[in-house]
Each structure stands twice: as C-alpha cells, then as structure tokens.
C-alpha cells in the first residue's frame, strides 16, 4: 500500500464492504421473519472489521477457511449478496447450490475453500492447504478463522503444533467475541489472552484490536507476508464482539447489562467512518450515501435471489461423489 | 458410481506376475502411484521410519524425497491436513497404524471427508486415501485388533475397500489412490507376510466383488483374512462333496449386492464370514438387501462373526477362539446344506 490514493480507495472499499456485511445480515433477520430463510444462522454483526481487514491482506492464490459464522469472510472475499441470499433460500444459484445453507458459504474460485459447521475443523484443513503450497513451492498462504471457543478443542492444538513443526504458511485468526456459544470465555477457558496459546508452539501470538479495520489489516498482512516468505505461522487474537446471540434463537440474555452498549461505542463501521471523515477522505454525507446505496443493492439482491429455481433432490446426487 | 477402467499408462511396466508379499504389494502400489503422479504423498505416524510400523513403506522415503511425511500423533488433525492438501492440488495417502485409532479422527472421517464436496455444491473433489491396518490375531489386545471395516460404511460420499491378498492389495490400493473421492482402504495385519503372484500395472475397478471359487451348493461371502479362511473351508467342504462358491466382497461401499444375489440365486444358501460383530455390519446389510428380493432360499442365511457381546482378548488361546476359523465357516455351510 505505497500509493496513497490506492490506499484511500481501499479503505473506502472496506467501509463499503462492512456496510454490505452489516446490512446483509440485517436483511437475513428480516427474511427469517417472512419464512424465506429457515433453519438457523450465526450472525457476525459487530465483527465486520475482523473479516474485512483480514481478507484484504490476501492476494491471488491465497486461501482461507472459516466457520458457520462465515458470512462476513465470504462477502469480503467477493461473494455477491445475491449469491449469499440464494444460498440461504436454498436456491440453485446459491454459492453451494442451496445444499450448503448459512453455515457453508463457499467459493473456491475466490479462495474460500471451506466454511465449517464443526468447531475447530477448519484449522487442520488450512494447515493442509498451506502444507501443499509449501511442498509444491507455490508462493501462497492460508488464513483460518475460528472463534474463542475453538481454542479449547483438540484440533486447535493439533493444528498449531503441526503448523509450527512444518513451518507451514498459515495465519490462525481467533475472532474472540468473548462467548463460546452461550458461555463467557472466563467460565470455559484457562487463558485470558488467547494469543498466549501461541507461546508453547514457539510462534508469534498477538492481541489485536479487532474493532479497528486498519489495525487488523496491518497485523494480518505482516503475518501473512512473513508466512509466505517461509517465516512460519502466527496466532492473532482479534478482540471483538458479536451484537447478536450465538444463533438465531439465542436472545443473549447471559450478557452483563451495558456490555453490548459499551462495545457499540467502538462499532467498527463508525470507527472507520470517523477516521475517514477526520482525514477528509469520506464526508458524513458520502458515508450516508454509501449506506443508502448498499441498502438498495441488498434489497434488490434478495428479491432476485428469491426468483431462482431450486434443484431437484436427484440433481444434488452429482455433488456426493466426484467419480 | 463410476468404474475406473482406464488402462495403466503406457510407460509403465507391462503386467508381469511377480511373487510378492502382501506388504510388498502395498509398497509396490504406493511406488507405482507415486511414480506416475507427483501429487501423491504419504503421511502418517512414523511412515518414514524404518519402512513404517508394518514395513509397508520401505524405500519410499529415499525414492520420493519430501513426499513421505511423518506426522505427530494426532489422527483428527492430520486427517484434516490431508483434506486440505487434497483440495489444493495434492493426492494424499494417509496411514492409520491401527484401525482402532480411526475413531480419534472421527470428525474428519464422518463430517469432513465425505461431506466436503457435497456441502460446497460440488466445488471440490477430495482424493484422500486412508490406509488402515486392521484385524485380530496379532495378540495385540482389545484396542489394537479391530477390523472395523463396517464402522463407517453407512456414509454417502465415502468409498471403502478391503484387501484379501497381495494381488487384491496392489490393484485395489492403486484404484483407491486414483479415485477422486475419499477411500478407506483396509489392510489386515495377519496378511502382511502372505506371498502371492502380483501383476503390476493392474488397477481394480471400483465396487465389484469377485468370485474366487465357483460352487453350486452354498455361497460364502467374506472380506480380508476371512477370505482365505473361507477358501480353506470350501476345500474341506469339497472333500465332503459340498460345492461352495466363495466371494471376496472387496468393496463395502459401494456394496456389490448384485453379485452376491446372482450367486445366491444359483446356490440358494448364504454364509457370511466376517471378522467383526454382525450387528450393523456389511454382512447384516447384505442379508437385509437380499431379504428385499424374491430369492428362492433353500436355507436361511447365516453369519459366522465375532461372538456376540464378547470383546477381543489378549490371551492367545482365547483370541483364537474369538476369531472365526475355517472350521466354523465350514460348519455353518454344512448346517445350511443340511449335512
């Protein structure tokens, strides 16, 4: 990011992306009420800076895995809201043809090689991709996103160990939103700063302000460049917060009074907007115009998605086996 | 389901039968696949050390530097690594030291490998082969003796192969590695030292059982070590004037019930010979499938299996009583025939 103008455009782009994620998920909630989307969703509202800032560190050829709370990463990678809505509506035009659903927003052409509904499962997969890059001398790296809760499951420790032993080009990103499902971190986890779980593996472990997209991007970019250059893996802990409950049916009553409001005072979109305004890069009027435009695009995308056909059950058979 | 019928690449050695042990046949299949496809890698616990725990990998680390990779002891973790490699351009073969360890990779085997393609709407192929050393008779006690070949048989998205001889091991393993879907490939510990003629260059189809001995009075279906015990039983039965047909099932998923049905239509009698408990296994599934056809049975189908509600003990005397013998298989066949 040596070119100032390009840098500016980029950050305006991030602002746009964060609104896309925020309003996409707002629409998801609305479509649930109308019955167009069923089952469950795990919304990432409040965590947009982690998704957008991290994904912006990727370049062509890099890959990432994420989780059932993966709308943010998928949209930041370039999945269109229409493709996302179509997936949520079970339509053939969805990213996973409507068979995946909310927890599996995947597009391998964009470097999105997995969105997993099993806690911790995406980490070894990302290590595997990174190992393949290393063995085949391809100059790429892998990111893997997971929650604070995943740092207690075996695959987290297994993946960090393997990545450290093999020096694979992978960056582990903890989206620490303070709750593993309904349980506060301190009731389930023996470590306060989860980044410290990097220490026994001899890799850098960094606590990051997950509300500030600039800080997120700078930290992930440095870790990813280091990984690609053969410097080994890193563990980054993004301190952030989810505005909604764990899943659609969770009203999040376990939160302390005032906690949500305190976090909203450092809302990632507001934070970037204030910086861009202060730097004279994007006025409040221009910001309002972006939000209005994104909302109109989201509304139109949802309408178009609802028009798409649904596969027959027999047509999904081709996705079971490749041979 | 498709069938792998492609001929072996022209540059390969023309099929010549050579005598190999079962472990050498596995080694030959690995060598031939690693030679023909630079994306094939072998990983697992101790795979590069002294030929691996069952000496199946002798010479491979030297022939293919950097492509035989020892992992930490973390089956679920390295199975996920293999998946990640398979969707980014490689074709990993994973070695599981004992079948009993496979459940520690339960999530990868149940939720990841067989579902990964489907839940992406067909964006991926997942060409991972899992080589599993299985079976009792080694005096290894109850946590190192399972065949376990039916534990994961009910999963769409997964293929399961079992090898009963050196030739079967060679051609099935090559087919498994070439397949673009995840394959669980079961080897049997007791068979590693068995010798047999192996035609290199032959690659098995996917999903077809094989009639190893033709007969007219009773059909015996078996996998792994039970195949040679069934052949021994058939020999003994022949001496008594009973003609037994022996089928090596080879594939558990897809399960070739059509071949078994064709045989049972001829014989009217069926004996399942399985080194596993009968409940929830391929034997019970075969009987269920056949029960849904109009076969003119001459006797009820029976199964020779691990004894109900007993576990595999260490004591050599007791372990030998636990595992089905050729005599027990022959006795079941005699009962079916009514002699």
Image: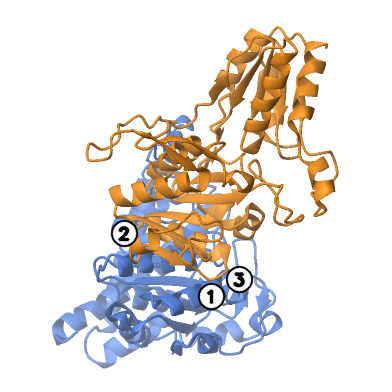
Chain colours: A blue, B orange
Number of the front mark, 1 or 3? 3
Residue A115: image x %, image y %?
A: 46, 60
The chain to which mark 2 is attached is A
Bin the neighbour count of mark 1 within 10 Å (Cα to Cα): few under 14, some 14-19, many 20 and up: many
Dot 3: within a 10 Å radius of its alpha carbon, few (fewer than 14), some, or many (20 or more) residues? some
Q: Residue at x 50, y 47 (%)?
A: A36
Disc 1 and disc 3 in contact, CB within 8 angstroms:
no
Q: Position of residue A264 (x, y in %)?
A: 50, 83
The quarter of the image holding the C terminus of chain B is top right
Residue occupied by mark 2: A297
Quickly name the residue at label 3.
A154
The reply, left or right, for residue A242 in relation to residue B325 is: left
Q: Earlier in the sequence, mark 1 or mark 3?
A: 3
- Quarter of the image with the N terminus of chain B in it: top left
As drawn, A14 above or below A106: below
In this picture, residue B300 sits left or right of residue B47? right
Q: From the viewer's perspective, tell me whether residue B136 is left or right of residue A139.
A: right
- What is the secondary structure assignment of the residue under circle 1? loop
Mark 2 or mark 3, earlier in chain: 3
In this view, which residue lies farthest toward the bottom? A278
Percent position of residue B144, x then y: 70, 56
Same-chain status of marks 1 and 2: yes
- Name the residue that disc number 1 marks: A242
């Amino acid at each position: 990011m040596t070119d100032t103008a390009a840098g500016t455009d980029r950050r305006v782009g991030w602002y746009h992306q964060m609104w896309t994620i925020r309003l996409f998920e707002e629409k998801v909630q609305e479509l649930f009420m109308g019955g167009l989307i069923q089952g469950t969703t795990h919304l990432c509202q409040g965590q947009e800076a982690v998704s957008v800032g991290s994904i912006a560190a990727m370049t062509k050829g890099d890959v990432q895995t994420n989780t059932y709370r993966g709308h943010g990463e998928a949209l930041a990678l370039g999945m269109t809201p229409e493709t996302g809505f179509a997936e949520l509506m079970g339509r053939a035009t969805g990213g996973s043809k409507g068979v995946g659903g909310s927890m599996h927003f995947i597009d391998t052409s964009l470097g999105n090689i997995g969105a997993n509904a099993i806690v911790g499962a995406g980490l070894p997969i990302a290590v595997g991709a990174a190992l393949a890059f290393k063995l085949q001398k391809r100059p790429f790296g892998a990111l893997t996103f997971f929650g604070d809760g995943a740092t207690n499951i075996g695959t987290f420790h297994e993946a960090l160990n393997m990545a450290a032993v093999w020096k694979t080009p992978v960056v582990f990103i903890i989206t620490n939103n303070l709750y593993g499902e309904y349980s506060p971190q301190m009731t389930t986890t023996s470590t306060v700063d989860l980044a410290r779980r990097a220490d026994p593996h001899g890799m850098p472990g960094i606590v990051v302000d997950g509300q500030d997209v600039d800080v997120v991007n700078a930290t992930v970019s440095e870790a990813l460049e280091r990984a690609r250059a053969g410097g080994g893996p890193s563990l980054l802990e993004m301190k952030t917060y989810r505005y909604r409950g764990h899943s659609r049916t969770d009203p999040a009553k376990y939160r302390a009074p005032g906690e949500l409001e305190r976090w909203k005072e450092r809302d990632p979109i507001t934070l970037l907007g204030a910086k861009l305004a202060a730097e004279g890069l994007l006025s409040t009027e221009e910001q309002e115009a972006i939000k209005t435009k994104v909302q109109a695009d989201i509304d139109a995308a949802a309408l178009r998605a609802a028009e798409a056909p649904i596969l027959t059950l027999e047509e999904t058979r081709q996705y079971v086996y490749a041979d | 389901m498709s069938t792998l019928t492609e001929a072996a690449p022209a540059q390969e050695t023309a099929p010549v039968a050579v005598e190999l042990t079962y472990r050498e046949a596995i080694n030959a299949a690995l060598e031939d696949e690693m030679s023909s496809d630079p994306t094939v890698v072998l990983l697992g616990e101790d795979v590069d050390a002294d030929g691996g725990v069952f000496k199946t990998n002798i010479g491979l680390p030297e022939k293919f530097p950097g492509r035989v990779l020892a992992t930490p002891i973390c089956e679920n973790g390295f199975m996920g690594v293999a998946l990640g490699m398979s969707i980014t351009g490689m074709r990993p073969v994973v070695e599981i030291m004992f079948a009993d360890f496979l459940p520690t990779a339960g999530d990868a085997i149940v939720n990841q490998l067989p579902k990964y393609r489907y839940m992406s709407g067909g964006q991926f192929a997942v060409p991972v082969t899992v080589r599993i050393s299985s079976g009792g008779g080694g005096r290894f006690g109850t946590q190192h003796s399972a065949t376990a070949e039916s534990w994961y048989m009910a999963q769409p998205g997964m293929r399961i192969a079992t090898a009963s001889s050196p030739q079967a091991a060679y051609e099935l393993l090559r087919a498994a590695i070439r397949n673009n879907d995840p394959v669980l490939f079961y080897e049997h510990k007791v068979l590693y030292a068995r010798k047999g003629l192996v035609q290199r260059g032959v690659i098995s189809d996917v999903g077809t059982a094989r009639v190893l001995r033709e007969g007219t009075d009773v059909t015996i279906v078996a996998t792994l070590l039970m195949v040679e015990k069934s052949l021994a039983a058939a020999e003994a039965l022949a001496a008594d004037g009973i003609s037994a047909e022996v089928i090596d099932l080879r594939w558990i998923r897809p399960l070739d019930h059509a071949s078994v049905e064709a045989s049972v239509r001829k014989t009217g009698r069926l004996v399942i010979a399985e080194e596993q408990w009968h409940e929830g296994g391929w034997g019970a599934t075969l009987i269920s499938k056949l029960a849904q056809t109009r076969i003119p049975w001459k006797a009820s189908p029976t199964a020779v299996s691990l004894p109900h509600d007993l576990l595999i003990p260490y004591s050599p005397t007791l372990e030998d009583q636990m595992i089905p013998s050729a005599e027990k298989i022959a006795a079941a066949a005699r009962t079916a025939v009514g002699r």
